[in-house]
Amino acid sequence: MRKYSEESNIKTYLTALITEKGFSVDSTLNREGHIGLTWENLIEFCEQLSESDQEKIIDTCTEIDFFNRDVFHYLNFLVDGMIQSFDLFISKNTESNSGVR
């Protein structure tokens, strides 16, 4: 496994990867029910993950890119996971605020 360093942080890596592929981090992602979601939102989400998870994401993207595969397939998979975690968080907070347990 590669040594994690400040120079290869998740924000720098994903921003460079997305822009290298011809997209802006401000590009809107078309996800039903999630208006205005951008690549920048995914990057911010990934910054909150553990260092180990960030390393895994960078390593996976690097491997996919090395073999000339579509890295956006994986990034969209991460976006779907981010949305699910948001939905779970909202659902959990809605239940606790309404007194339902």
Image (tube, grey):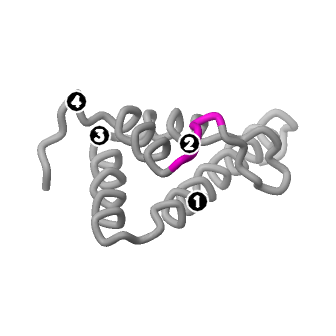
Q: Secondary structure at mark 4?
A: helix
Residue that numbered label 2 is attached to: 42
- Residue 85, disc: none
Residue found 67% across the figure and 51% down from its top: 83
- Label 2 with label 4: CB-CB less than 8 Å: no
Q: Amino acid at mark 1?
A: Asn
Crowd rating for badge 3 (residues with CA inside 10 Å; few <14, some 14–19, many 20+): some
Predominant secondary structure, magenta span = loop
Residue that numbered label 3 is attached to: 51
Instruction: Name the image quarter holding the N terminus.
Output: bottom left
Residue found 72% across the figure and 49% down from its top: 87
Q: Amino acid at mark 3?
A: Glu
User: Over which residues does the magenta segment extend?
Assistant: 22-26
Q: CA distance from mark 4 to mark 3?
A: 13 Å
Residue that numbered label 1 is attached to: 76
- Label 4 with label 3: CB-CB less than 8 Å: no
- Label 1 with label 2: CB-CB less than 8 Å: no
Looking at the image, is mark 4 or mark 3 nearer the viewer? Answer: 4
> Quick one: label 2 or label 4, which is nearer the N terminus?
4
Q: Position of residue 38 (x, y in %)?
A: 66, 40
Residue found 18% across the figure and 33% down from its top: 5
Q: Secondary structure at mark 2?
A: helix
